[in-house]
């Protein structure tokens, strides 16, 4: 029997496949507009180029980082014709560091870009515009980050410890001795850190380092192998000289070298102190966090006789200020250790009308005892995945006012559609500029059910 010819299975159904473009190829192109993440968009031979570091109207040379079909990711190598809006970056490493992607863009344009992204996401699912667009909530453009993660990697060939921040679109580590977006208290620690790490007897045991600024500064050393006494003494001497706490983390939770030293941050407008540990979630931008809490209370307008619900409460960042204004506050969080610390924070601050519970908020709430009795208002501050399951239960819980704080406009738009389907109206919305110099968008939205 003749062998069947299976060649037809591999023939294209039509057209021809575009040839692959090698990584590193340089291409001249004109940027026609900006994407929602701030990258410039240009078109060449049927392909769409997304170019980081470019502005609309510029003629540039871009270096290809990667291609997927007809979508090309690239970064600016040279600028032949610059936009009149372009400004010099505050950081000399801005073009290579992966931390800040919009330093070349005026702050007002950054805010407009984020506002546009929020509006487009809300309208994408057919959501109506809010009755009122709030002005962007802003803080300092620079010097705002009160925590940072420092990348550390041992180069076996060079016998060298690389210390710095990750490069954009790369695993390379960029050595940085000055970061303009860090708070001033962490700057001297950042500058002196690489030398002390390289002087360790076993520098290859260091996984990464995290810096924190609150009631005091703190340095967390994540180590992949046990540290010797001499290395521990060097790290402790370094932190003492920097007036910072030393925390260590192996395979378990972070632990302070001196357990008697507290680590906390203040909410001065509310006379509150919130204790936390490295690894707990805290907002990186203290001025915007303070303004965000004040705006949330203003929009939600909690009353002294009301019972209010706070979902994804964390350490109590919103819960404690809310508890100061209402009859009873129920706060729920998915991580048990955070629930315990939030409850301690409430007790420490003399708030006895707040109760804290653990629940998996990615799943529907199944008749929890704390949900009995209903709520006049609810505040939600979910992670990037959003809060779809609990949002679906807002009307059933009797909630009349919902304040949603979002770090992802896409899931905010999805959850908004669910609230609107339950009869809520989108009363107000606006962006929170929690991360200036980046394309990251945070937002706040108020829903009211007549």
Image: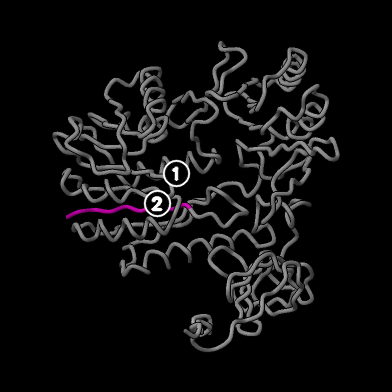
Q: Would you say 415 lies left or right of 107 here?
A: left
Q: How is the image coloured?
A: one colour
Whole-percent x, y for residue 117 in the image: 48, 64
Q: Would you say 381 lies left or right of 71 here?
A: left
Q: What kind of element bears circle 2? A: strand
Residue 33 appears in which quarter of the rendering?
bottom right
Q: Which residues are magenta?
A: 442-450
Q: Would you say 88 lies left or right of 362 here?
A: right
Outermost residue to the right: 158
Q: What kind of element bears circle 1? A: helix
Q: Residue at x 26, y 31 (%)?
A: 330
Query: Image height check: is 366 above or below 82?
Result: above
Query: Which of disc 2 and disc 1 is earlier in sequence?
Result: 1
Q: Residues within 10 Å of mark 1 (few under 14, many from 20)?
A: many
Q: Main secondary structure of the magenta part?
A: strand
| Front residue of 353 and 133 | 353
Query: Image height check: is 188 above or below 123?
Result: above
Q: Residue at x 30, y 45 (%)?
A: 300
Whole-percent x, y for residue 64 in the image: 71, 68
| Front residue of 330 and 369 | 369
Q: Residue at x 84, y 40 (%)?
A: 157
The span from disc 1 to disc 2 (Cα, nearest Å) is 9 Å
Q: Which mark is residue 292?
A: 1
Whole-percent x, y for residue 258 in the image: 61, 12
Q: Which mark is residue 448?
A: none
Residue 40 visible in the snapshot? no
Residue 320 part of the magenta-drawn span: no
Residue 446 part of the magenta-drawn span: yes
Residues at discs 1 and 2 in contact (Cβ within 8 Å): yes
Q: Would you say 110 lies left or right of 151 here?
A: left
Q: Quadrant of the C terminus?
A: bottom left
According to the picture, the residue beneath numbered tag 2 turns out to be 444
């Amino acid at each position: 029997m003749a062998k069947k010819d299976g060649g037809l299975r591999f023939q294209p159904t039509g057209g021809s496949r575009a040839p692959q473009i090698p990584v590193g190829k340089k291409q001249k192109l004109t940027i026609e507009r900006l994407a929602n993440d701030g990258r410039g968009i240009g078109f060449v031979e049927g392909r769409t180029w997304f170019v980081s570091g470019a502005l609309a109207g510029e003629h540039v040379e871009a270096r290809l980082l990667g291609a997927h079909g007809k979508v090309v990711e690239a970064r600016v190598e040279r600028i032949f014709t610059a936009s009149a809006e372009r400004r010099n970056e505050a950081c000399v490493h801005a073009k290579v560091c992966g931390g800040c992607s919009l330093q070349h863009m005026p702050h007002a344009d950054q805010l407009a870009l984020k506002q546009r992204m929020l509006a487009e996401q809300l309208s994408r699912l057919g959501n109506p515009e809010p009755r009122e667009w709030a002005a962007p909530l802003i803080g300092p453009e620079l010097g705002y980050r009160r925590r940072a993660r420092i990348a550390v990697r041992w180069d076996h060939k060079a016998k060298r410890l690389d210390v710095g921040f990750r490069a954009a679109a790369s695993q390379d580590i960029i050595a940085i001795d000055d970061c303009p977006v860090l708070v001033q208290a962490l700057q001297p620690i950042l500058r002196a850190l690489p030398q002390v790490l390289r002087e360790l007897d076993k520098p290859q045991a260091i996984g990464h380092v995290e810096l924190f600024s609150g009631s005091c500064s703190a340095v967390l050393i994540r180590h992949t192998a046990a540290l010797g006494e001499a290395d521990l003494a060097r790290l402790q001497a370094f932190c003492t000289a920097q007036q910072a706490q030393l925390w260590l983390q192996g395979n378990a939770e972070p632990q302070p070298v001196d357990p008697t030293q507290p680590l906390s941050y203040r909410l001065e407008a509310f006379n509150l102190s919130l204790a936390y540990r490295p690894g707990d979630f805290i907002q990186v931008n203290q001025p915007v966090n303070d303004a965000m809490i004040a705006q949330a209370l203003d929009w939600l307008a909690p009353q002294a006789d009301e019972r209010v619900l706070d979902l994804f409460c964390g350490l109590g960042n919103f819960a404690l200020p809310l508890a100061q204004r209402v009859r009873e506050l129920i706060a729920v969080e998915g991580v048990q250790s955070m629930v315990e610390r939030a409850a301690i924070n409430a007790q420490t601050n003399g708030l006895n009308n707040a109760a804290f519970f653990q629940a998996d908020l990615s799943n529907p709430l199944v008749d929890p005892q704390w949900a009995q009795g209903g709520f006049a208002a609810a505040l939600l501050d979910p992670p990037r995945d959003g809060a779809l399951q609990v949002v679906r239960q807002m009307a059933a819980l009797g909630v009349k006012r919902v304040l949603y704080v979002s770090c992802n406009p896409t899931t905010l738009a999805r959850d908004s559609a669910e609230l609107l389907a339950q009869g809520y109206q989108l009363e107000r919305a606006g962006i929170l500029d929690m991360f200036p110099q980046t394309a990251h968008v945070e937002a706040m939205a108020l829903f009211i059910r007549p």
